Image (cartoon, rainbow, N blue to C red):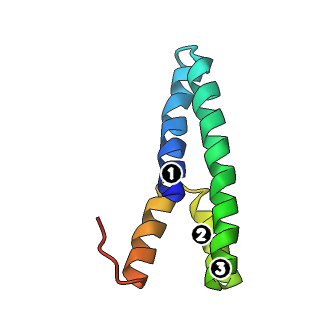
Amino acid sequence: MIALMEGVSFILLLMAMPLKYLYGHPEYVKVIGWIHGLLFILYVLALVNVKMSNGWSILKSVIAFLASLLPFGTFILDISLRKEENLPVS
């Protein structure tokens, strides 16, 4: 859930950037950026927790971390993990 919320906040932050630089509304980036930063920290903490509790390899953990740096990366990661666990992809 945190990964999906972090992914949404990242997309919103990318959408807010033109509002700041083209239309002079830095408040959107400030608010969304703060929320995204908090969600990113929670994502990394959750990732460490999952790595430790589920025995994820370093490679899988690094891939999950890198997914958070790419637009739509956490959404693709979620789909991949659901398929791996044989959970419904919705």
Instruction: Identify the residue at the far front of this view.
Output: 53
Q: Amino acid at mark 3?
A: Ser
Q: Amino acid at mark 2?
A: Ala
Q: Give left or right: position of 66 versus 82.
A: right
Q: Position of residue 28 (x, y in %)?
A: 56, 23
Q: Position of residue 12 (x, y in %)?
A: 49, 37
Query: Which residue is painted at 67% across and 70% down in the image?
Result: 49
Mark 1, other Cα within 10 Å: few <14 / some 14–19 / many ≥20 = many
Numbered disc in front, either 1 or 3: 3
Q: Amino acid at mark 1?
A: Gly
Mark 2, other Cα within 10 Å: few <14 / some 14–19 / many ≥20 = many
Q: Give left or right: position of 27 versus 58.
A: left
Question: Mark 3 or mark 1, which is nearer the start of the sequence?
Answer: 1
Q: Are marks 1 and 3 in contact (CB under 8 Å)?
A: no
Q: Give left or right: position of 74 versus 89.
A: right
Q: Position of residue 77 (x, y in %)?
A: 48, 68
Question: Mark 3 or mark 2, which is nearer the start of the sequence?
Answer: 3
Quickly name the residue at label 2. Answer: 64
Quickly name the residue at label 1. Answer: 7
